[in-house]
Image (cartoon, grey):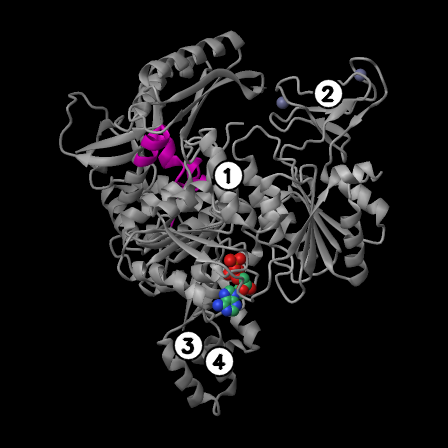
Amino acid sequence: MIAGVIVDVPAFGTDKTFDYRIPEHLEETIEVGMRVVVPFGPRKLTGFVIGLKETSDLKRLKKIEDIVDPSPVLNQELIGLGKWIANSTLCFLHSAYQSMLPAAMKMNYSKRIYSINEAIELPDLPEQIRIQLDSDKGLDWAEAQKSGKHIVRSIQSAIHNGNLEVKYEIRSKGKKKRHKVVMVNIPTMELNAIYDDISRKAPKQAEVIRYFIGNNETKIPTQKLMDETESSRATIKSLIDKQILLETEEEIYRDPYKDRQFERTVSLTLTEEQKESIKPILSDIENNQHETFLIHGVTGSGKTEIYLQSIEAVIQKGKEAIMLVPEISLTPQMVHRFKGRFGSEVAVLHSGLSVGEKYDEWRKIQRKEAKVVVGARSAIFAPFQNIGIIIIDEEHESSYKQEENPRYHARDIAIERGRFHQCPVVLGSATPTLESYARAKKGVYTLCTLHERVNQKALPTAEVVDMREELRSGNRSLFSTALFDRLKDRVDKGEQSVLLLNRRGYSTFVNCRDCGYVAQCPHCDISLTYHKRSNQLKCHYCGFEDKQPTECPECTSEHIRFFGTGTQKVEEELNKLMPEASVIRMDVDTTSRKGMHEKLLNAFAEQKADILLGTQMIAKGLDFPNVTLVGVLAADSMLHLPDFRSAERTFQLLTQVGGRAGRHILSGEVVIQTYTPEHYSIQLAQQHDFLTFYDKEMLMRKLHQYPPFYFLTLVTISHEELMYVVDVCEKITEVLKEGLSEQAVILGPVASPIPRVKDRYRYQCVIKYKNEPTLKNILNEILAHYQKRMQQDQLTINIDMHPQTIL
Ligand code: ADP
Ligand code: ZN
Ligand code: ZN
C-alpha cells in the first residue's frame, strides 16, 4: 500500500503530495487523516496522510517511519477544505491543515491512551496493558507501539469504537484527575412519576430527583450533587441501587467554566420581526439546504435570540452548530447565554484558554460530547461531522480575517463548509460590511432586517461635539463641557458611564517641542510608544524598549515629553477633574494578565466604579443595565488613516458603542467628541442611519475603485537589504503588468506604510481588479520562481488575496 503525504516542507500548490510506501507492520494501522513521520532527504519530517492507493508512478519509494497519531486528526471534509484554502489563499497545504488543529497537537506532546470506562471489557488486550489503560497515568502510545501489531490494532479499534481515548499531554502537566459522577439512568420523562411515587416515603431521595427535574443537566459530579441537595452518600446510593441513577468515574476536564453556575434559560416568544427572520433559516435547517443569510438588526433587536432558537432546531435534528463571535465579544455574559440554553453541550474556544484547556474543548467536539461550539475565528474548523448551522455574529469584525498564513477569512470558510454540509450560514450585524450588504442586495445572500429593538426602547440620542469649538472657547481639557457635565451628573446620581478612547492610529509618542524630534524605533520605521508605568518607550512591532529620555537627543532641549492621548492620560485627567469618581481602566496594559479582562468587567457590573474607561475592547457585547452615558473621545482618530475602510470602521465603532447605553429601563445618552463633526460617517452614526451610510460609502468605493467594486490583492516583499527588496518588487510588478489584463490596476512598487520592521525593509504592490482568471496562476509562478531564495536568502513574499487594509 502507498500513502500520499503532505509533508511539512515549503512547497506550493495542492498537488505536492509525496508518495510513501506503508511498511507491513503499519499496513492495517494507517488511515487517511493521520499524521505520520517520513524521511525527507536527510531529515525526518511529519506529514498528513491525505490518500491511500495501491500503486505509484514512482519506482523507488521510501517508507513511512512511524505514525504520530493513533487515530485520524482530520476527516475527509477537512482534508478537502484544506485544499480549498491552499488554493484560494495561496498558502502551503501543510499550513492549511496545521491551522485546523489545536496548538497542543502542533507541538511534540506525549500521547497517552486511557480507557473511557473501566467497565468495558477489552479481551483482546493483555492484562498488563489493560491495567495501564485504567490507571491515572494511562498507557504511553510510544511504548504501546512496541508491543506488537495485534495489540496496536486492537487498541486502535477500541479507540475507533469509542472505548479508549487518546490525549496529548504536555509532560509537566500530564496529571489527569478523575472523579465520580452520577447520571440519570432512566428516561427523563419518568422522573416526575418517580418523584410523586417516593416523595412521601423517601423525601431525601425525592429531593435529589427534584434536582434533576429542575436542571437541564443529566450528569453531575457526585460530590456536587450531594452539596447541592444537601444529601448524604447513603441517599445517593439508594437511588443508584434502585437503578434510577448510575454512577461512573470520569476524567475532570480542564473546564475554565466549571465553577460557574449557569441559570437555565428557555426560548422566548419571538416578536413578529424575529419570526419573519427565523422562518427561512428554520426551513433550510429542516430541508438540509444551504443558503447564506445576512441579518441586519440594530443592537438589541434580538439577533442572539434568533441564533439560539436556530441552534435549538439544529440540535433537535441531531446535528451540530458553530457559533462564531469576535474574540473581544466572547465575554462571560455571551458564554452564559449559550451555556444557559444548551448546558454542557457547549464547547468554548477562545484565546484566553490555556493550550491544554483549548485542546480539551476541541476533544469534546471530536468525541461528540459537544453539540455547539462558541468561539473566535479558529473555531470555524471545529471537527464536527454533521453541521446543521454556522453563525457569525458581528460579521463586520476585522478579527475574522487571519493576518498571517493562511490568510483566510472565517466568513469564506463558513460558506464553504455550509455548502459541504448543505446547511444555512447566518451572518449578523448592526453594521454589516459593505461587501456583505452589497451581496445581500444583489440576492447572493438572503437579507433579513430587524428594524426595532425588542423592548421598543429607542436608540440612545447622540450628541456630536465639535472639539475645535471647545478649543476656541478656551477649553483645553480632553473633555468637552457637554461631556464633563453629563459625566458629573451620572456620578452624582449613582449611574454609570462608559468612556471610549479610540486609540487605533492614535499613539502616545514622545516629541521634542523645540526641534520636533520624535522618538523612533531603531529597527522599525515607527514611533515608539510611551508607557507611563515603567517610564519606558516601547516599540509595538518588535518589542524594542528604551528609557524615556530626559533631554532631546537632537538638540538637547529639555522640552521633550509624550503627546497624544492614551488611556492612562485620560485616567489621570479624570482623577484630577473629578476626584470623587471611581474609574476602571481597560486597555492592553491592564488586561494582559489572564483573567483580568473578566475581573475588571465584573467589578464594573457590580457597580464598583462610576466610569469604565477603555479602548475598542470595551465597545462590544457589554450589557450593563446601569450605564446611561457613553462618551467617545476623539471619534475621528481613525478617519485620518490612509485606509479605504476608515470611514466604515468609524461608522461601525460609533454605532456599536452607542448601542451600549440605555438598553434597559434607564434611557441612555451618547456624546461623540470630534474634530471633524461634518464627516458623513460621524453624522450618520449619530442618526443611526446605516442605509444612507451604505449608499454614500458605496459611491466613494466606486469612485476610488475599492471593494466591493474591485477586488484587492496585496503583495509585500521584505528583506534586510533595501535594494534587493526594491529590485524584487519591481520585477514582480513587471510580471504582473505583463500577465494581467488592461483593466487591472497595479499600484507599485512603493514602500509599505511601515517601511521597516525588525530591521527588514518592506515594499509592496497592490492589484485592483474585477476579473482576472489568470491572477492566481501568475502569483503561484512568482512564488515558485522565488521559492529557493525565500528558503535560503531570508527573502519574504507575502500575498494577501483580500486584505482588510492596505496600511
Ligand atoms: P442583539 O443580539 O440583536 O443585540 P439580543 O438577542 O441580545 O439582541 O436581545 C436584546 C435583549 O432582548 C436581550 O436581553 C434578550 O434577552 C431580549 N430579547 C430578545 N428577544 C426577545 C423576545 N422575543 N422577547 C423578549 N425579550 C427578548
Ligand atoms: Zn529637540
Ligand atoms: Zn521596533
What residue does disc 4 label? 210
Residue 53: % across, % down: 16, 34
- C-alpha gap between disc 2 and disc 3: 74 Å
Query: Residue 697's mark?
Result: 1
Foreground disc of the pair 2, 1: 1
Q: Which segment did they paint magenta?
A: 84-113
Residue at the (54%, 54%) spot, across then down? 256
On the image, which quarter does residue 95 sit in? Answer: top left
Foreground disc of the pair 2, 3: 2
Residue at the (54%, 27%) spot, across then down? 807
Question: Which kind of residue does numbered mark 4 sit on?
Answer: Arg
- Nearer the N terminus, badge 1 or badge 4? 4
Instruction: Answer yes or no: is residue 136 visible.
Output: no
What residue does disc 3 label? 240
Residue 340: % across, % down: 50, 65
Q: Residue furthest bottom?
A: 200
- C-alpha gap between disc 3 and disc 1: 66 Å
Q: Secondary structure at mark 3?
A: helix
- Would you say residue 95 sits in the magenta stretch? yes
Question: Which kind of residue does numbered mark 3 sit on?
Answer: Ile
What residue does disc 2 label? 518
Q: As displayed, is residue 90 above or below residue 247?
A: above
Question: Which kind of residue does numbered mark 2 sit on?
Answer: Val
Question: Which kind of residue does numbered mark 1 sit on?
Answer: Glu
Task: Assess disc 3: are there few (<14), some (14-19) or many (≥20) residues with their C-alpha within 10 Å of its C-alpha.
Answer: some
* Label 2 C-beta lies within 8 Å of the nearest ligand 2 atom: no
Residue 723: % across, % down: 51, 7
